[in-house]
Image: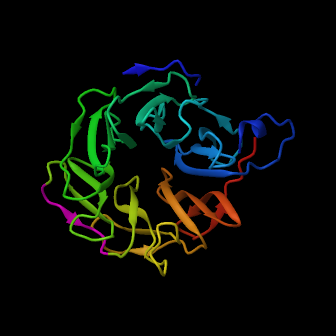
Amino acid sequence: MKKLSFLALPILLLLNCKSEGQELEGHIGRPDISPDGTKIVFIYARDASKDVWEIYSADIDGKNVRQLTTFPEARIKKGPVWSPDGQSILFHADIEDGAQIFIMGANGENLYQLTQLPGYNVEPIWSPTGGEIIFNSILEQGKAKMFIMDRDGSRIRELYNPEGENWYPRKLKGDKILFTSDFKQRDTHNVFSMNSDGSDIRQLTFLEGINWFPEISPNMDKIVFNSNKDDPELRDSGNYNLYIMNTDGSGMERITNLPGQELHAKWHPDGDKLVFEWHDPTSKGLYLLELSTGNIRKIRLIP
């Protein structure tokens, strides 16, 4: 594990602004909720095409926004996720000619690089106990494969990978893995489950288009994911909505129908709320959805 010398939906300039009540503006996305439900972590860049994307945290109501990383060597950082004990945050960042996985404390301290592998090593996620980390690795001109390692970056090993592109693995109870794949399909990604040795592969969704970023509920009885199945042209850059289903793929229903893209939903520990990223030409930011009522409200990020 390599310790770095770097110092650890709006820009630092805005965070230093003395006037309170000015809502952050810019590209805000990839949220996650702390295990106690009181905080969120997310990525931010005022101009996604020009600025360095850094990782920020805030209270769940959007107050007390704080920048956690100052890491200009990697222009893009994505996928911050809280550890089950709330003490650490994983993320991936572009570095040199690829991407690597990093870990830091919940306040941005003690930044370490966990992987030093060739290619792009991205989308880390914790196992339910926090003892292991699952992630994707892509060699140059290769396919996305699923890997697992111990919490400290040791014992890196490849999981079973069906033929095709296998994305966003999540470890469930016992030996079960949840992931998305184009396995036995063409121009389509659906949600699958399997045992980590590749046995008992089950396709959970049978939808057109791109259906990915599956996230299991705290009680491990529901899965939320985003899908572009409702986009007339099934465009990767087109319309995405959030769907929810039982863990066996039954009971599927659409839970958002907003213009633009609803993406990267994460569960609140109470199991009744989701925080997600929504953006279209007129609206960008993080939103909170209450499943029992269907109410959606914007999380106004205020320095």
Q: Quadrant of residue 125?
A: top left
Q: Where the N terminus falls, by quadrant?
A: top left
| Residue located farthest toward the right when viewing the structure as drawn | 19
Image vertical order of residue 50 relative to residue 245, above or below: above
Q: Quadrant of residue 167?
A: bottom left
- Pick the residue in front: 33 or 55: 55
Q: Where the C terminus falls, by quadrant?
A: top right
User: Which residue is drawn at the image coordinates 60% and 59% (left, top)?
Assistant: 288
Image vertical order of residue 272 relative to residue 138, above or below: below
Instruction: Name the colouring of the figure.
Output: rainbow
Q: Position of residue 174 (x, y in %)?
A: 22, 47
Q: Position of residue 12 (x, y in %)?
A: 72, 36
Task: Classify residue 299 as left or right of residue 33.
Answer: right
Say whether residue 131 is visible: yes
User: Which residue is drawn at the image coordinates 75% and 45% (left, top)?
Assistant: 302
- Pick the residue in front: 241 or 281: 281
User: Which residue is drawn at the image coordinates 33% and 50% (left, top)?
Assistant: 170
Q: Main secondary structure of the magenta part?
A: loop
Task: Classify residue 171 as left or right of residue 95.
Answer: left
* Residue 34 is covered by the magenta coloring: no
Task: Classify residue 69 as left or right of residue 176.
Answer: right
- Pick the residue in front: 150 or 255: 150
What stretch of residues is rendered in magenta? Answer: 199-206
Say whether residue 90 is visible: no
Q: Position of residue 139 (x, y in %)?
A: 30, 43
Image vertical order of residue 34 relative to residue 224, above or below: above
Q: Position of residue 47 (x, y in %)?
A: 68, 49
Image vertical order of residue 5 relative to residue 19, above or below: above
* Residue 205 is covered by the magenta coloring: yes
